[in-house]
């Protein structure tokens, strides 16, 4: 799609909404689809210890409001059912069964959390319901051979190369669940023969009030690198405690907790200068994107459909980009809104440009490649925003 032919409606191109049907065959429907409606299911922690991620769900709701305002997908309105699972895997199971067996959704979209998605992984594949574009960067979501109905979205966890840290002694904070364990396993794999550079590895339960004692242990181990594998609340706590202790390691934070509004600001801007992470979307707090066509469209959408949200919450960008991909997947289904065709179209993207992805990063999938976004760029926190540096790096799963 050439940029000079794009007419954006709230950042999503008119072509995405009004292009002719890809499929011109006789109409075919599975549960959750009809001549007038497409029903999609979603779970997200609007409450509980990971409620900071509720930003993502609210953004997705606002996105589908915009799509429906513009006439829906190929003339069909989208009924997006978003339920609060409190980041509790048993609750996720209960709600997903409700969505599949009672609401009879066509598919689920961007269900959040590694542990929560793990709890429904086998069920969704047994039921042959598309389990699409998950809000988790764990490596296991790209396994079409064993789980053909599940596809991730965000990059597999990037391997941070610590070659610039002389005699690196690494301290790791990890959330004690599938999310933390998968990230930890990927980090060790990235270190390879240098895995013995981890001098201390500590974990926390999401029900704990603070991670202060864990940070004290890492400092006591004389680590000069701090690898922070935490959800927003605890990531912010950890960086604040690092500063309180006067500890000055090189700090790396995982991408899912890199929001300026929900993590960096609560941690205290003075406390997070120089922190590193990997990014794949544009940050609305970065002034260098202010005049970019994507950012203008995103801000227009925020102003009209999500006015109470804060631009500094990166979850809004995540919800916007992943929903754009979901909308394009459904549009490409044309009048064949079957679950099998939804998966076929999801696995047929070739260098598709999603608004708000960083330049040079596109979406590509195939029947054997279920990792839609496979690249990242490193960024460093300075003043009150992230600053990108270096080249776009492949983040393909091993």
Image (spheres, rainbow, N blue to C red):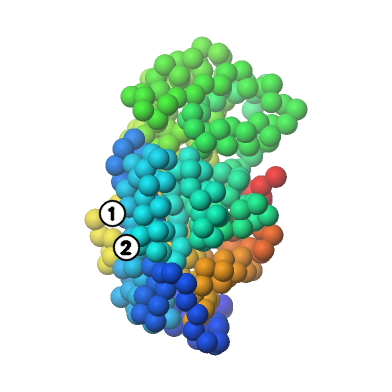
Question: Which comes sooner in the sequence, label 2 or label 1?
Answer: 2
Categorize mark 1 by other alpha carbons within 10 Å: few (<14), some (14-19), many (20+): some
> Whole-percent x and y of residue 378?
57, 45
Callouts 2 and 1 close, C-beta under 8 Å: yes
Q: Return the mark for residue 309.
A: 1
Looking at the image, which residue is at 57% across and 36% down? Answer: 183
Q: Split into 4 quadrants, where in the image is the N terminus? A: bottom right
> Whole-percent x and y of residue 77?
35, 75
> Whole-percent x and y of residue 216?
45, 15
Q: Secondary structure at mark 1?
A: loop
Looking at the image, which residue is at 41% across and 59% down? Answer: 100
> Whole-percent x and y of residue 107?
46, 63
Number of marks drawn? 2
Residue to which mark 2 is pinned = 62
Q: CA distance from mark 2 to mark 1?
A: 10 Å
Q: Secondary structure at mark 2?
A: helix
Closer to the camera in the image, 277 or 367: 367
């Amino acid at each position: 799609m050439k940029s000079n032919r794009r007419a954006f409606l709230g950042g999503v191109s008119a072509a995405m909404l009004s292009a002719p049907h890809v499929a011109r065959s006789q109409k075919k429907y599975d549960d959750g689809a009809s001549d007038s409606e497409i029903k999609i299911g979603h779970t997200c922690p609007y409450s509980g210890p990971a409620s900071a991620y509720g930003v993502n769900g609210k953004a997705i709701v606002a996105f589908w409001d915009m799509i429906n305002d513009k006439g829906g997908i190929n003339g069909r309105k989208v009924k997006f059912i978003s339920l609060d699972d409190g980041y509790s895997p048993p609750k996720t199971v209960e709600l997903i069964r409700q969505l599949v067996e009672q609401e009879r959704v066509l598919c689920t979209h961007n269900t959040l959390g590694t542990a929560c998605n793990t709890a429904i992984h086998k069920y969704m594949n047994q039921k042959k319901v598309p389990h699409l574009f998950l809000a988790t960067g764990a490596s296991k979501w790209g396994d079409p051979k064993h789980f053909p109905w599940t596809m991730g979205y965000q990059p597999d966890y990037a391997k941070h190369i610590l070659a610039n840290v002389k005699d690196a002694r690494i301290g790791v904070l990890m959330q004690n669940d599938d999310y933390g364990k998968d990230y930890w396993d990927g980090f060790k794999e990235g270190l390879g023969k240098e895995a013995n550079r981890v001098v201390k590895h500590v974990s926390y339960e999401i029900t704990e009030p603070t991670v202060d004692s864990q940070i004290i242990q890492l400092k006591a181990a004389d680590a000069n690198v701090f690898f922070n594998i935490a959800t927003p609340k605890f990531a912010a706590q950890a960086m604040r405690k690092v500063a309180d202790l006067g500890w000055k390691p090189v700090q790396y934070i995982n991408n899912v907790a890199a929001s300026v509004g929900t993590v960096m600001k609560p941690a205290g801007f003075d406390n997070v200068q120089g922190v590193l992470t990997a990014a794949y979307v544009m940050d609305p707090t970065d002034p260098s994107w202010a005049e970019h066509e994507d950012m203008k469209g995103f801000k227009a959408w925020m102003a009209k459909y999500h006015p109470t949200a804060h631009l500094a919450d990166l979850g809004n960008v995540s919800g916007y980009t992943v929903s754009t991909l979901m909308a394009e997947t459904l549009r490409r289904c044309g009048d064949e809104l079957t679950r099998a065709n939804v998966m076929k179209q999801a696995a047929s993207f070739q260098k598709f440009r999603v608004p708000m992805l960083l330049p040079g990063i596109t979406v590509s999938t195939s029947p054997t490649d279920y990792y839609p976004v496979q690249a990242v760029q490193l960024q460093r926190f300075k003043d009150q925003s992230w600053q990108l540096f270096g080249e776009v790096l492949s983040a393909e799963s091993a």
